Every structure is written in structure tokens, then in C-alpha cells.
Image (tube, rainbow, N blue to C red):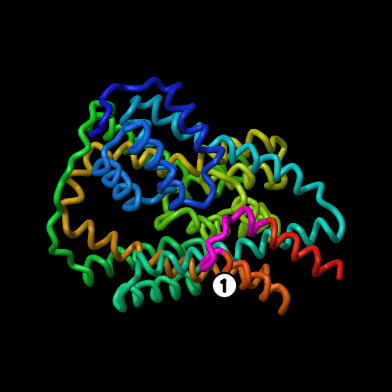
Amino acid sequence: MANNTKRSSPGEVFCAFLRLGCISFGGPIAHLGYFRDAFVERRKWLTEAAYAEVIALAQSMPGPASSQVGFAIGLLRAGWLGGLAAWAGFTLPSAMLMLAFAYGYGHAQGRVAAAALHGLQLVAVAVVAQAVLRMQRTLAPDLLRLALALLGAVIAFFAPPAYATAAAIAAGAVSGLVLLRRRDSVTDDPLHTSSITQRAGAWAAAVFVVLLAAALLLAASHSIFPAVLASLYRTGALVFGGGHVVLPLLDAAIVQRGWLAQPSFLAGYGAAQALPGPLFSIAAYVGAAIRPNAHPLLLGMCSLVALFSPGLLLMAAILPFWTTLRRRASIRSSLGGINASVVGVLAAALYRPLITTAVHGFADAVIALAALVLLAYFRLPPWIIVLGVTLASILVVLR
């Protein structure tokens, strides 16, 4: 329940999140720190316990966790319009920059430009390696869950790309249900809200299912516009474990279908690391960079909505029912298996396509490893790593 029970206008929510969208560097964990400072400490829109409940919910479902937390805060504070205002304010700054990068990438020519873009690919290697290390410590900290992560990696690596991630997640869910039996009790601190009712949650769930069915039907469309949006919506519905897990899913949904070249995709992924706001904003770049594409700006913005929509709809659907659902030990066991499995999925993606595409020799390996050390052990901000690695990549070419 919110500390400050006075409701806010959607405009106030938008302005609060727009500021955060411009300054929130550092990825999802850092975003949650920014949110806590802004909405628990300073604005007092939420209690500490209520904020922890929202985070627990976001981490238990597919989608971009920090964006889902922001969306939930907006919902609790100002209803449906508040939720949309929170998402738009937090997302638009990085989305606009990713659109600009998509237009600039096509005009990048020459050895220096190619080296700079290759540097962004090496940044992606370091960032994903750091994500694997962090996620292993929190989601697969013991031998049993480490074994589930290994199982997920094997499935993701050897299964057909179109189904590999979904198969790994399903295996994790079943394994968690069987092997990770939870008997601990849950102390409830319900999120009291009149902003979204259980009936509204049921409607959100229905919309999610209808759009998912449409996405499955349209994914094979010969028209690129609906096919891309369908693939991105389906991708957004499968992203368990944080924003970086979107990498292998987007690779299978977009790159493997020939809509976007692997180097272009990885360059966009690397550029996204230097920006504030959610990593899912890469969808704007993907939509605008896809070829052939008669309307890159329109496809970029629609792609952004398509990738985010499943996670936001699920948050709206489950939020009113969360207190009841989280009491079920079976659900918590399955989620434990899923979370362990996605560590393996991301580890498989680190090797292929990231390392196999971006690391061409000893110098590239040294640069990527140095970037990882600076990120993981010296905790330098990602934007500094982006600038440093890009410069190093250029110097290697010019030497």
C-alpha cells in the first residue's frame, strides 16, 4: 500500500518517469535502485514492503522487469493511464536514441566506422558475460539449480533455434516443479489498490492470450510488417530472467529469418548498453533497421510496442491476483526452475551468436575480457565501457 495515499495525475507520473528515463544508466538492477529512491524514499508513493512485492511479481513473469515495475507503480498511483504514462516516460528517451542509431548505422562507412561498430559488438560480449555471472549467483547458486542451468544451456544450444528458448524454459519449469519443492511459508503484505480490479486483470489476461494467438498465426505471414510484429510479440512473451535474455530470442525471431544481418543486430545491442532506460528499447532499432522496410520509423515504433506489450499486459493481469498466487508452493518451485534455466539460455547465447560473431582474434578476445573485468569487478558504468571499447577497436584497426 502506498505511503502517500493521494493519487497522482498521469501527467505527474509521466514527468517523474521521463526524468528517470533520461538518467537511469546501468541496467535493470540499477533501474530498480533509481525507482526505490524516487518512489519509496523521496515521493513516498509506495512502502518498502509494497515495492518488494512489485519486484517479486515482475521477476516471476516474462518481460522486462524494471519496465514492469515502473508500469505497476504507475498503475497503483494513477490507474491505467498512469501505467501507460510510466512506461512511455521511462522508455521514450532510449527508444528515440535507438531510432537515431538505426538511421545512422546505415550511413556508417569506412574502416573507422566499421571498427566502431565492431567495438559495440565486443561490448555486447562483455555485458552478456557479466549478466551470466550475476544471474548465476542469484538464480542458480547451488549445485541443483546449476545443473538445471546446464540443462537449459544444452537445450538452447542443440535444439532448433526457433524453439530452443521455449523448450529450455519448459524443461526448467517441469524440473523445478519436480526437484525444487518449496515448503517455506510466505508472509503476505498485500498490495491494496483500487486502481486495477480483478475484473480488469482478467480482461488484460484475455487480451494477452488473443494477441499471442494472433502472433502465432501471423508469424509466417509473407507481409513483413505483421510478420515482424508477430515475432516480436511472441518474443516478449518468452523473456524470462531479465532483459539480456531477449538476445537469443531476437536472434531466432529476427536475425535467423534474414530480416537483419547479425553484425547490425549486435551493433544495435552494443549501442543499447550505453543508453539509459530499458534494454527492450532495442526493439525500436530492430524495427527501423530491418530490410526491406518501406516505413522504418513506423515499424520501429510499432516494434517497440509489440516487444513490450506482453510483459505489461501480464503485469496488469496478475497484479490483482498476486497475493493469492504467490502462496502456492508449486508456482514458486516452477519459477525457481525457470529462472535457473534462463541462466543456461543466456550462457548459450554468449557463445553463439555473440562470441562466434564478434570475437575474430586474440586482440578482440583481450578487449572483450578487459571490458568484462572493468564491468564486473571495477563496476565502471556501461557507457564508459562503450566509449573505451569503441576507441580500442578503432585503435586496433588503425595501428
Amino acid on which disc 1 is placed = Tyr
Nearer to us in this view, 239 or 253: 239
- The answer to whether residue 128 is seen in the rendering is no
| Residue 75 placement: quadrant | top left
Q: Secondary structure at mark 1?
A: helix
Looking at the image, which residue is at 60% across and 47% down?
Answer: 275
- Residue 40 image point, x, y percent: 33, 38
Nearer to us in this view, 363 or 75: 363
117 in relation to 23, above or below: below
What residue sits right under mark 1 in the picture? 351
- Residue 142 image point, x, y percent: 30, 75
Nearer to us in this view, 73 or 378: 378
Looking at the image, which residue is at 45% across and 21% down?
Answer: 11
22 in relation to 364, above or below: above
Looking at the image, which residue is at 31% across and 78% down?
Answer: 143
Classify residue 102 as left or right of residue 81: right
| Residue 101 placement: quadrant | top right
Point out the stretch of residues depicted in magenta.
375-386
- Residue 207 image point, x, y percent: 37, 35
Q: Residues within 10 Å of mark 1 (few under 14, many from 20)?
A: some
Quarter of the figure with the C terminus: bottom right
Looking at the image, which residue is at 63% across and 37% down?
Answer: 96
- The answer to whether residue 377 is seen in the rendering is yes
- Residue 184 image point, x, y percent: 14, 61
Quarter of the figure with the N terminus: top left
97 in relation to 345, above or below: above
Q: Is residue 382 magenta?
A: yes
Q: Is residue 83 magenta?
A: no
* Total residue callouts: 1
